[in-house]
């Protein structure tokens, strides 16, 4: 690449490094409150159940389940945090090579992006981390099964999950844009998103009733604006033309919508 700059789509790890206040005020606070309150409630309910008080046994069972869920919740968010004392403790995991001087790479498929960035990551493993990936033919049941087993093993061992993408960078049906990516997170990681109790009776059923159409439409519009903004920048258009796209994305980001969707 004949360039002195590069634009990457990447994730900075650990994500806790850029979300310390969120970890303290939300995740750690919830875990601490649950750890202090639920064991006491469980002990009191155990005493009540031993005396055969009406409804105590059922409430004890639910409280015990909530205590166990709170423990799993604390384990889940702590798994993605590690101490950061200097830049040496940070890792950058790139997964898209978006642009270099005079050129964008939206015409390249995802396999090209991943392999190109793998080579880049090997050149500086102290800072960059190559992202593992799989190419799956959805018409091949054996490949689908292997990918499912890979995801299950990944999330079962504490991994966050994966992001599923069509093979082409900008996928279309010929007439309209297809959602370019979909996060598929693991069971335990979702505790961080939906709360410790999301797997308890009734909660998961309510989550499945959510309408994600608005969130999906926002994502498609933000993606299109991002592509257009970068194309304008690389083409050397005035910054005011680039800023039109940037401010469009910022406006969409300010739309009131549940960020957990």
Image: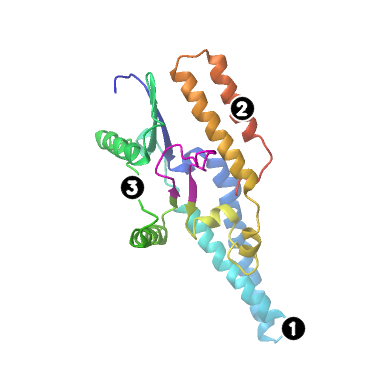
Mark 2 vs mark 1, CA separation in Å: 58 Å
Mark 1 vs mark 3, CA separation in Å: 54 Å
**Where's residue 137, x and y in %?**
36, 53
Classify 158 as above or below 14: below
Is 158 positioned to the left or the right of 43 in the image?
A: left
Question: Nearer the N terminus, badge 3 or badge 2?
Answer: 3
Classify 166 as above or below 227: below
Q: Main secondary structure of the magenta part?
A: loop
Which quadrant: the N terminus?
top left
| Mark 2 and mark 1 residues within 8 Å of each other at the beta carbon | no
Kindly identify which residue carries mark 3.
132
Q: Which residues are magenta?
A: 163-183
Please identify the quarter of the rendering in which residue 242 is found: top right
Kindly identify which residue carries mark 2.
248
Mark 3 vs mark 2, CA separation in Å: 33 Å
Question: Which labelled disc corresponds to residue 54?
Answer: 1
Question: Nearer the N terminus, badge 1 or badge 3?
Answer: 1
Q: Nearer the viewer, residue 77 or 144?
A: 144
Q: Residue at x 66, y 70 (%)?
A: 41
Magenta includes 49? no
Question: Nearer the N terminus, badge 2 or badge 1?
Answer: 1
Is 93 positioned to the left or the right of 243 in the image?
A: left
Q: Residue at x 49, y 14 (%)?
A: 237
Q: Nearer the viewer, residue 210 or 68?
A: 210
């Amino acid at each position: 690449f004949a360039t002195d700059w590069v634009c990457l789509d990447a994730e900075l790890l650990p994500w806790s490094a850029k979300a310390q206040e969120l970890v303290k005020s939300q995740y750690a606070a919830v875990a601490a409150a649950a750890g202090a309150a639920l064991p006491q409630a469980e002990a009191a309910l155990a005493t009540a159940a031993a005396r055969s008080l009406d409804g105590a046994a059922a409430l004890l069972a639910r409280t015990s389940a909530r205590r166990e869920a709170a423990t799993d919740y604390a384990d889940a968010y702590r798994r993605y945090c590690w101490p950061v004392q200097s830049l040496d403790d940070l890792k950058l995991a790139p997964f898209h090579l978006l642009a270099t001087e005079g050129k964008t790479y939206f015409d390249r498929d995802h396999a090209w992006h991943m392999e190109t960035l793998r080579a880049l990551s090997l050149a500086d493993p102290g800072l960059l981390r190559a992202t593992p990936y799989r190419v799956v033919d959805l018409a091949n049941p054996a490949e689908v099964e292997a990918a499912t087993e890979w995801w299950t093993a990944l999330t079962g061992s504490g991994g966050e999950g994966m992001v599923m993408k069509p093979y082409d960078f900008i996928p279309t049906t010929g007439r309209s844009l297809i959602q370019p990516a979909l996060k598929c997170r693991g069971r335990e990681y979702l505790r961080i998103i939906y709360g410790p109790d999301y797997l308890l009776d009734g909660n998961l059923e309510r989550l499945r009733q959510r309408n994600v159409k608005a969130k999906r439409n926002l994502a498609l519009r933000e993606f299109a604006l991002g592509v257009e903004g970068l194309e304008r920048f690389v083409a050397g258009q005035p910054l005011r033309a680039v800023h039109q796209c940037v401010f469009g994305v910022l406006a969409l980001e300010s739309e009131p919508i549940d960020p957990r969707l």
